[in-house]
Image: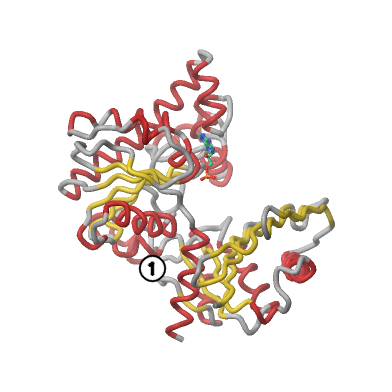
C-alpha cells in the first residue's frame, strides 16, 4: 500500500487529493485558495465526513505546500511526510515533448518551462507547484501528467492547421487539444460499461464542464479533438468562445479600438461563451433557469452550446466511420439530464434512443440509451485526480 497525492496548481490555488493506492481510496482532499492574496482559505475534507476550514495569510506557493503538509500531520491524516510515496502534478501543456506522463527530473522541468507560452496562464503555475513539492517531499516520486499528451496519437491530418506548413515546423503551431486526462479516464470506464475491449471501440467522449472538449477515440487512442493550439478552440464554453473566424476577431479589434492582442484574447477567454451570449452567467444552471423564465438570449446560449457539441459528434462519427459509444462527463455532462437529452434526441435519425429513466438517475456511471439503440450512450463521472495517481503508481513501478 502506498499514499499518492494528486496536485492541481493554479496561479493562486492548490487543489489536492490524497489516495491510498492501489485500493484507490480517497484519504483526504481539499484546496488552498487565494495564495498570495489577502485572506487565503484552506479547506480539507478527510475521514468520515470530517472537514477543516480556516482563513489565514499564505504569502506564496511554497508556504502553502508547507502549511498543507503540516495540516495533514495535525489532522492525523498522515504521521510522517515520508508516508507520501508519490506526487502527481497536472500540467496543462506538454507540447510535442511529452507523449505520456513522466517522472520529473531537471530536464523535464526545463522542458515544461520552455513551452510555457503554449499555456501562459497554467504552465508557470504548474511548475511552481512541481518545484515546491519536490522541495517539501524530496523522497517522493514526482510525476507530471499532461492534459495534452493523450492527444499526441492524433494523425497529422487532424492536427496540422491549414496555414503555411512552416508555422507547424518552425513554431509548433498545431492542434494539441486538452482534457486528455479526463478523456483517458472516462473511455476506460466506458469500455467497462460496454464490457468490450477499449482497443476495439470507436468512442466519442464529451467533456462538458466550464471548459468543454469533445474527443474522438479510435481503438483506445485519441483520433481527433475539439480544442486546438490552446483550450480556447472547439465548442462554446462557460466563458470561452470556442471556434471563431479570426477575421471576425481582427474586425472587432478595429471597431472596438482594441490594440492589444492580450485584451482581445481576454474577451474571447473570459467574456464569451455562455456568459457572453446570454449576458446572464457563465454557469449553465443559471443560464438554463433564465432560459426557462423566457430569457431569449439565455435560450440562444444553451442552443448554441448544444449545437456546437452536436457538430463535433457528427463530425467525428463521419471521420471514424461510425461510433460504438458516446460518453457524457464533467459538470454539465454528468449532471444535466436535460442537456444530455436534447443532444441525444437530435441523433434519433441514426437510431440512437435515449432511456429517459436511466438518463434521469444521478451520481452514477450508467448506460443512458435503450438496449435497442444503435449506439450506446453513457454518463461517466470523470476523475482526473485518480488518473494522475494511477500514472504515478505505474511510473514508480517502472523506475
Ligand atoms: P466543471 O468545470 O466540470 O466543474 O463543470 C462546471 C459546470 O458544471 C458549471 O458551469 C455548471 O454549469 C455545471 N453543473 C454542475 N452541477 C450541475 C448540475 N447539478 N446540473 C447542471 N449543471 C451542473
Total marks placed:
1
User: In the image, 379: left or right of 27?
Assistant: left
Give x and y (percent) for residue 350: 17, 33
Task: Return the residue nearer the eye: 51 or 314.
Answer: 51
Residue at 39% over, 39% down: 235
Q: Furthest-top residue in view?
A: 294
Taking 171 as reference, is 208 above or below it?
above
Secondary structure of the residue carrying numbered label 1:
loop
In the depicted view, which residue is nearer to us: 240 or 326?
326
Is residue 259 depicted above or below 165 in this figure? above
Colour mapping: secondary structure
> In the image as oriented, which residue stretches furthest toward the left?
321
Q: Position of residue 209 (x, y in %)?
A: 48, 43
Left or right: 194 as drawn, with respect to 338: left
- Say which of 366 and 231 sits in front: 366
Q: Is residue 166 left or right of residue 336?
A: left
Quadrant location, the N terminus: bottom right
Rendered residue at 73%/54% (across/down): 51
Residue found at x 80% / y 62%:
59
Return the x and y of residue 304 as percentages of the image width and height: 40, 28
Residue toward you, 106 or 219: 219
Question: Ligand 1 within 8 A of label 1's CB?
Answer: no
Q: Pointer 1: what residue?
A: 96
Pointer 1 local density, CA inside 10 Å: few below 14, some 14–19, many at least 20: some
Image position, residue 182 (x, y; %) = 43, 55
Residue 163 visible at all: no
Residue 248 seen in this snapshot: yes
Quarter assignment of residue 302: top left
Amino acid at each position: 500500500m502506498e499514499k499518492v497525492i494528486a496536485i492541481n496548481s493554479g496561479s493562486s490555488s492548490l487543489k489536492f487529493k490524497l489516495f491510498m493506492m492501489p485500493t484507490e481510496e480517497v484519504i483526504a482532499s481539499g484546496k488552498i485558495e487565494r495564495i498570495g492574496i489577502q485572506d487565503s482559505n484552506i479547506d480539507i475534507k478527510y475521514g468520515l465526513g470530517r472537514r477543516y476550514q480556516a482563513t489565514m495569510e499564505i504569502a506564496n506557493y511554497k508556504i502553502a505546500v508547507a502549511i498543507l503538509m503540516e495540516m495533514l500531520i495535525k489532522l492525523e491524516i498522515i504521521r510522517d511526510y515520508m508516508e507520501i510515496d508519490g506526487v502527481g502534478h497536472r500540467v496543462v501543456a506538454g507540447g510535442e515533448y511529452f507523449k505520456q506522463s513522466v517522472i520529473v527530473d531537471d530536464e523535464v522541468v526545463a522542458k515544461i518551462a520552455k513551452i510555457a507560452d503554449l499555456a501562459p496562464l497554467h504552465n508557470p503555475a504548474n511548475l511552481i507547484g512541481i518545484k515546491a513539492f519536490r522541495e517539501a517531499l524530496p523522497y517522493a516520486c514526482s510525476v507530471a501528467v499532461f492534459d495534452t499528451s493523450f492527444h499526441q496519437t492524433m494523425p497529422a491530418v487532424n492536427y496540422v492547421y491549414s496555414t503555411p506548413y512552416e508555422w507547424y515546423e518552425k513554431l509548433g503551431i498545431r492542434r494539441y487539444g486538452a482534457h486528455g486526462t479526463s478523456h483517458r479516464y472516462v473511455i476506460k470506464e466506458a469500455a467497462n460499461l460496454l464490457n468490450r475491449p477499449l482497443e476495439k471501440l470507436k468512442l466519442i467522449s464529451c467533456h462538458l464542464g466550464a471548459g468543454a472538449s469533445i474527443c474522438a477515440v479510435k481503438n483506445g487512442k485519441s483520433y481527433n479533438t475539439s480544442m486546438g493550439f490552446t483550450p480556447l478552440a472547439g465548442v462554446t464554453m462557460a466563458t470561452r468562445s470556442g471556434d471563431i473566424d479570426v477575421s471576425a476577431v481582427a474586425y472587432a479589434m478595429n471597431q472596438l479600438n482594441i490594440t492589444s492582442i492580450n485584451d482581445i484574447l481576454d474577451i474571447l477567454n473570459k467574456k464569451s461563451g455562455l456568459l457572453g451570449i446570454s449576458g446572464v452567467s457563465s454557469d449553465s444552471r443559471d443560464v438554463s433557469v433564465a432560459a426557462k423564465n423566457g430569457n431569449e438570449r439565455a435560450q440562444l446560449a444553451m442552443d448554441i452550446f448544444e449545437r456546437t457539441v452536436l457538430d463535433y459528434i457528427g463530425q467525428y462519427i463521419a471521420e471514424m466511420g461510425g461510433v460504438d459509444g458516446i460518453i457524457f462527463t464533467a459538470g454539465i455532462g454528468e449532471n444535466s439530464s436535460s442537456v444530455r437529452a436534447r443532444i441525444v434526441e437530435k441523433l434519433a435519425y441514426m437510431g440512437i434512443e435515449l432511456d429517459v429513466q436511466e438518463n434521469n438517475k444521478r451520481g452514477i456511471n450508467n448506460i443512458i440509451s435503450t438496449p435497442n439503440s444503435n449506439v450506446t450512450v453513457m454518463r461517466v463521472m470523470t476523475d482526473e485526480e485518480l488518473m494522475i495517481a494511477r500514472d504515478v503508481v505505474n511510473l514508480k513501478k517502472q523506475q
